[in-house]
Amino acid sequence: MLKTKKIKVLVIDDNFGISFLMRKALELKNYEVEILNSFRNVNEIKEISPNIIFLDISIGKKNGLTISRELKNNTLTKNIPIVMLTGEANTKELAKEAGASDHILKPFGLIRLYKIVEKYTKKV
Amino acid sequence: MLLSIVMCILISMSHHQKVSDPLGDPKDGHILTRAIIDTIREPLIVLDEELRVITASSSFYKKFSLNRENTHSKMFYDLGEGEWNIPPLRKLLEKIIPKHTTIEGYEVKHNFPFLGLRTMLVNAREIQYENGRKKMLLSIFDNTIERELQSEKEKLLSQKDLLLKEMRHRIANSLQLIASILILKAGMVKSKETRFQLEDAHSRIMTIATVQEQLDPSALEGEKVKIGKYLTALCNSLSKSMIGGRKPITIEVMIGVDARKVSPEEAVSLGLMTTELVINSLKHAFPGTKEGKVLVTYMSTNKKWSLSVADDGIGQSKKIKSKRPGLGTGIVSALAEQISAKIKIESTKLGTKVSITHAHAKNQKNKSLSNRR
């Protein structure tokens, strides 16, 4: 019997509450969710091999923009769409410059979250 | 300006005018020149074309621990222990000045043995006489303290920006947590009424959060929200979060062309009133699965503004009209009072319209009264 592979969403956010709730919300829609509360290196991301990454703009001491650039500069991860999670409306352009496909302003509703995942994983 | 005065005097010395000079006999011109150079507060030095010292102001000697005797006729670069042999200053004297004659505010940083690191602003001017000889005036302003203050100010501003960003990030995270818990809970509960209550609470949080989205983070003081854009975004969000799970109802927004900018506080009040009124319409105007429309209108002129929420539902029955106002209506009344606005409710069988109007002229008096309550 043919087994369909679930779409894998990776959430990188150092706020445990938010990453937990995002996992709950995404699992309701049958997505496979991986959480990272910190970023170590690109290989870790490649190993998880997500279809989309939600990346908090301020993650511990490392800036989400820097992580995005790092992921986009690496051949192993450059094609994974990154959605920046941000608390400030004026970071849209910064996120774009850092290679993010989109940004989502906190607080966001579940419909917006689902629409974003659908938009960037349509081809999967 | 002092440089200009000194230059004028030096020029007058070279011209030997035949007419009587109000400053005195030109032959005595150098006496006046020396007196001026000696009395000015800003360190000033006069060099000849070979960059040897002709004279300097007392303030120059004092500031840089030199004296008249050990500087006279000495090469400028050899003064003191050679501390004036500064590459950027050499560039100014040997390359820039011969081309441009006058330079103002040329910044030079240097570590002096007795003074430490100083930032100086140098004004330089070359004077050419008819006989082809040249002199050079250098005035040196020690800008170190001003620069330090400026740098401290920039550092504080950057820290403030960082703190503000961090604060916004934390607020956003907190709102996200509460909003997510409410909406996830709403999806879990079996009671329809409880689910609606949780969804309504979620919408109220999102209403306040949407204001944050409309603020310009670079303009802290007097931040303003474009009310038209805000109400449109808010109604879109309400439409997405509430309609889908409830009834086939559409929310339309109509914003007047003159829609103004308002303070964040006023935007929150207008947003919350809109949210409560839309929730009221959704709850009461369309029983069963009746289709319907809610129209949110905002109009403003210089003198007044009005916000209305109208639905094409069943209208308020006598029973509802006689009932004590609910929580939503209570919130709308309180917020309207806070911004000195008046509420008018019109209800027929064709629908209900709630209008909130505010006339700017009456604003101040009413506001101060309501604040005292």
Image (tube, coloured by chain):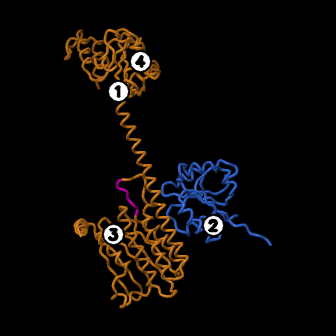
* Mark 3 lies on residue: B305
CA distance for labels 1 and 2: 62 Å
Query: Residue A71: horizontal and vertical position, in percent?
Result: 64, 50
Q: In the rendered picture, chain A carries what hue?
A: blue
The numbered mark, 4 or 3, whose residue comes first in the sequence reads 4
- Work out whether B246 lies above or below B181: below
Q: Amino acid at mark 2?
A: Glu
* Mark 1 lies on residue: B142
* Mark 2 lies on residue: A118
* Numbered range of the magenta stretch: B221-226
Query: Badge 3: how crowded within 10 Å, few (<14), some, or many (20+)?
Result: some
Say which element carries label 2.
helix
* Mark 4 lies on residue: B84
Q: Amino acid at mark 1?
A: Asp
Task: Looking at the picture, tell me which residue is in the foreground, A16 or A57.
Answer: A16
Does the magenta portion include B200? no
Subunit that carries the residue with mark 3: B
CA distance for labels 4 and 1: 14 Å
Task: Looking at the picture, tell me which residue is in the foreground, B314 or A91.
Answer: A91
Tell me if B229 is positioned left or right of A101 in this view: left
For the point 34% across and 22% down, which residue is it?
B139
Query: Residue B188: horizontal and vertical position, in percent?
Result: 55, 77
CA distance for labels 4 and 3: 68 Å
